[in-house]
Amino acid sequence: MILLNNILIMIFIISNIMMFLSIILSKKSLLDREKCSPFECGFDPKSCARIPFSLHFFLITMIFLIFDVEIALIFPIIPLFNMVNFLMWTKISIFFIIILLIGLYHEWNQNMLNWIN
């Protein structure tokens, strides 16, 4: 028990020394507001936060995330080929790809894939 207390005290002392040294040796200055401000995708952090943002870029981002997740869902289909027979594997794969194509068709009809509105 005494050994554990000594180890915990040493860890506490070493971590405080390291934090104190990092504060002393850091090159940050409190006068430099530009470095202390958060960077938000090229927007000026000192201007109004409610500037208009293009909805089209947001929709493109959502499409990318949806297809990115669907690609991650396709990966388990590959090892499934060894576990089930070929006909069952083909049905599962075709069903999943049909769902992807229906989503792509819907996005095409909504003109989400056009860059020029």
Image: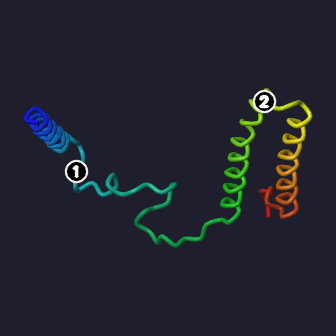
Q: Position of residue 77 (x, y in %)?
A: 77, 36
Which of these two is toward me, 17 or 29?
Answer: 17
Compared across the picture, whether 24 is left or right of 63 comes to left
Residue depicted at 10% across the width and 32% down the height = 3
Q: Quadrant of the N terminus?
A: top left
Residue 2: name its quadrant: top left
Labels 1, 2: front one: 2
Give the farthest residue toward the right. Answer: 87
Residue depicted at 79% across the width and 26% down the height = 82
Q: Position of residue 65 (x, y in %)?
A: 67, 51
Residue depicted at 87% across the width and 55% down the height = 102
Residue depicted at 22% across the width and 42% down the height = 26
Number of marks present in the image shown: 2
Q: Quadrant of the C terminus?
A: bottom right
Residue 105: name its quadrant: bottom right
Residue 19: name its quadrant: top left
Graded by Cα atoms within 10 Å as few (under 14), some (14 to 19) or many (20 or more), the crowding at tag 2 reads few
Cα gap from disc 1 to disc 2, whole angstroms = 61 Å
Residue occupied by mark 2: 83
Secondary element at tag 1: loop
Secondary element at tag 2: helix
Q: Position of residue 14 (x, y in %)?
A: 14, 36
Q: Amino acid at mark 1?
A: Ser
Q: Amino acid at mark 2?
A: Met
Compared across the picture, whether 34 is left or right of 65 comes to left
Give the farthest residue toward the front. Answer: 1
Above or below for 64 versus 4 = below
1 or 2: tag closer to the N-terminus: 1
Residue occupied by mark 1: 29
Compared across the picture, whether 18 is left or right of 89 comes to left
Colouring used for the render? rainbow
